[in-house]
Image (cartoon, rainbow, N blue to C red):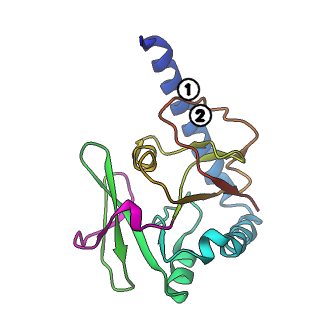
């Protein structure tokens, strides 16, 4: 199969342009008065989902300032006696999940993301019941635009458990205006406020 390199480069540029614009939209939205109410509605909806209720091991990110704040979700999971795992990235665009506990220590990556320092508690894909997938844009059909590294698409391509995303009003689109390629992995469900 021949790949049209020019078309693929155009798609990558389109995604990058859309992503940069979208990040600015999100930065402004998180400063708006109703943003916290949207986050709380998303927390409530997630906790009502059977995939959350039934999960023994939940994968979350340690959120940045432009992501849905995951600290309350991590605390809720621990309160429900769930194991919480968060991603750690490695060369070759690889990602693994590691268990965290309240005493865990973190380090800041070159991407500006906190990752666990401890690499002894790696958790395999088949032990994770639910992954709450981050992103900058989503459709209700599950199409997703991530942060550009491809880490989640690679990881999710071999994952068979439940996936869900939380999309405040600034991240939700009717269709994938950013363009899609064959490597994009959709999430099973997208929750909106």
Q: Say whether residue 115 is left or right of residue 193.
A: left
- SS of the residue at dot 1? helix
Residue indicated by mark 2: 18
Magenta residues, as a range?
Answer: 111-129
- SS of the residue at dot 2? helix
The quarter holding residue 72 reads bottom right
Give yes or no for contact between labels 1 and 2 (Cβ–Cβ under 8 Å). yes
Q: In the rendering, at what x and y percent does residue 110 appear?
A: 31, 52
Number of numbered discs overlaid on the protein picture: 2
Q: In the rendering, at what x and y percent does residue 108 appear?
A: 32, 63
Q: For residue 116: magenta? A: yes
Camera-side residue of 37 and 134: 134
Q: For residue 147: magenta? A: no
Q: Residue at left 46%, top 11%?
A: 4
Q: Say whether residue 105 is left or right of residue 176.
A: left
Camera-side residue of 100 and 148: 100
Residue indicated by mark 1: 14
Q: Residue at left 66%, top 70%?
A: 46
Q: In the rendering, at what x and y percent does residue 71 appear?
A: 52, 75
Crowding around mark 1 (Cα neighbors within 10 Å: few <14, some 14 to 19, many 20+) is: some
């Amino acid at each position: 199969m021949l790949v049209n390199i020019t078309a693929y480069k155009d798609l990558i540029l389109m995604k990058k342009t859309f992503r940069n614009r979208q990040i600015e939209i999100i930065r402004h939205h998180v400063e708006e008065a109703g943003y916290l109410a949207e986050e709380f509605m998303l927390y409530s909806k997630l906790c009502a989902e059977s995939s959350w209720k039934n999960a023994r091991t939940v994968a979350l990110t340690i959120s940045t300032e432009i992501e849905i704040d995951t600290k309350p979700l991590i605390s809720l999971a621990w309160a429900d006696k769930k194991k919480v795992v968060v991603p750690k990235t490695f060369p070759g665009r690889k990602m693994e999940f590691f268990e965290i506990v309240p005493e865990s220590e973190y380090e800041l990556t070159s991407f500006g993301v906190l990752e666990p320092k401890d690499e002894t508690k790696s958790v395999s894909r088949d032990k994770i019941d639910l992954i709450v997938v981050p992103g900058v844009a989503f459709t209700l059909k599950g199409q997703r635009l991530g942060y550009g590294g491809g880490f989640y698409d690679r990881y999710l391509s071999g994952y068979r458990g439940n996936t869900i995303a939380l999309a405040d009003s600034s991240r939700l689109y009717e269709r994938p205006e950013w363009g899609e390629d064959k490597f994009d992995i959709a999430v099973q469900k997208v929750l909106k406020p």
